[in-house]
Image (tube, rainbow, N blue to C red):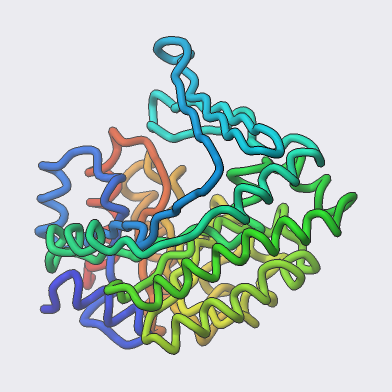
Amino acid sequence: MMNGRERLMTTLRGEKADRVPLTIYDWLIPDKKAGKRLIDKGLITINSKRVFHEEIRGVTVRKKEIGLGINKEFVTTIETPVGSLVERAKLDPTLQSRWVIEHFIKSLDDYRVMKYVFDHTETKPAFEEFREADVRTGLRGIVLGEILPIPIQWLSVELMGTETWSEGVMMYPDEMAELHESLTRLYRQQVSIAADSPAEVIWLPDNITGSIMSPQLFDQYCGPIYAEACVELKQADKLSFSHFDGINRPIAKNIAQTPVDIIEAFTPPPMCDMTVAEACAAWPDKVLSLNVPGILFTEPYEVIESYIKQYMKEGSQRNGFVIGCTEEYDFTKFEHAFSAIGSAMYDES
C-alpha cells in the first residue's frame, strides 16, 4: 500500500496509483480526532503555503476593527501619494470565511491609485513556512506552493467585485488592460519564485467560472497567462494545480487549450453543470481532481454512496483521478460524509 503522499503525487503526475486518492483541505477538518481516524483509513490532507511575500514602497496600509460579534468589520485603508482606497470585510461566524462587503476599487478613479500600489510593490521569495508545513504534514499528505490567482481573477474577486469588474471589462477596456498589465508584472514574479521553490505542486487558486468569465474574456485574459505561467512551471518540473470549482461547460474548450496540468476542485452535479464523464472527455490529457458537492454532505449515507459510486464509475479507470473536498460544508457532518465517501470508493463489492 502506498502512503498518502505517494498515492496523491503519483496520481497528480498522471500515473496510476494503488487506488484513487481521497483528499481534503487540511483546514476543513473540524474534528481532529475524527480526522485522525479517517486519515488512518486513507484520507489524504492537502495544505497550502504562500511561497512569496510582498514589499510595498511609498504606501501606508492601516487596518482596524469596528463593531462587535457578528457585526464586526475589518477595515483596511491604503494611502498613496495619488489617493486612498478603503476595503471593508466581515467574517462569517459559522464557516469563518472572509467576505468583502466593500472592495478597494469602486470607480474608474480608483484604477490609478491601485496601479500605483502595484507599480510600487515587489515580490520576494518566502520558503520557510512552506518547508515547516511540509515537515509537519509528513507522509499523510502534501503542501501546495501557493501564489495569487491569475491577475484578472484577483481583480474580480478581491479588489473590485463582480459588478465593478464587469463594468471595467465592458466600458473601460483600455484602463482595465493597463491595470491588468501592472498586476501581471507582480504575477510573473510570483510564478518565477514558485518555479524556484521547494514545492512540487503550485496552487493557482483561480476560482474561474463560466457564469462570469465568457469564452472571449477567457481567451483575452486567462489563456495567455496560463500559457506563460504553466509552461515556466513545467520547465521547472512543477505541476500546476488550478482551482475550477464553478460552471465549466461554457469555457470547457478554453480550459482544454491551456497547459494547466490539474483541474482542481471540479464540481459535478448535483451542484454544477458538467458530469465527471463529460469532464474526462473534455480534458483527456489533464488530471481531474474532483470536489464532492457540499450539498451531499447532509444527505443520507446511501445517497452519498450512490453519487460517489457514479463518479467512480465515470472517472476511476483513467490515470489522474482524485476525489476530495475543497469547499466549506456542514462541519457537523464531517465523519458521516467521509465515511460514506470512503465506503463507496473502496468497497470492492
* Extreme residue in the top direction: 68
Answer above or below: position of 336 versus 193: above
Residue drawn 59% across and 75% down? Answer: 226
Residue drawn 27% across and 82% down? Answer: 10
Q: Is residue 343 in view?
A: no
* Extreme residue in the right direction: 171
Answer above or below: position of 113 versus 280: above
Residue drawn 36% across and 58% down? Answer: 50
The quarter of the picture where residue 91 lies is top left
Residue 116 is left or right of residue 147, and the answer is right
Q: Where the N terminus falls, by quadrant?
A: bottom left
Q: Nearer the viewer, residue 173 or 21?
A: 173
Q: Nearer the viewer, residue 203 or 18?
A: 203
Residue 177 is left or right of residue 189, and the answer is right
Residue 178 is left or right of residue 258, and the answer is right
Residue drawn 52% across and 29% down? Answer: 76
Percent x, y of residue 74: 48, 24
The quarter of the picture where residue 300 lies is top left
Q: Where the C terminus falls, by quadrant?
A: bottom left
Total marks shown come to 0
Q: Is residue 143 in view?
A: yes
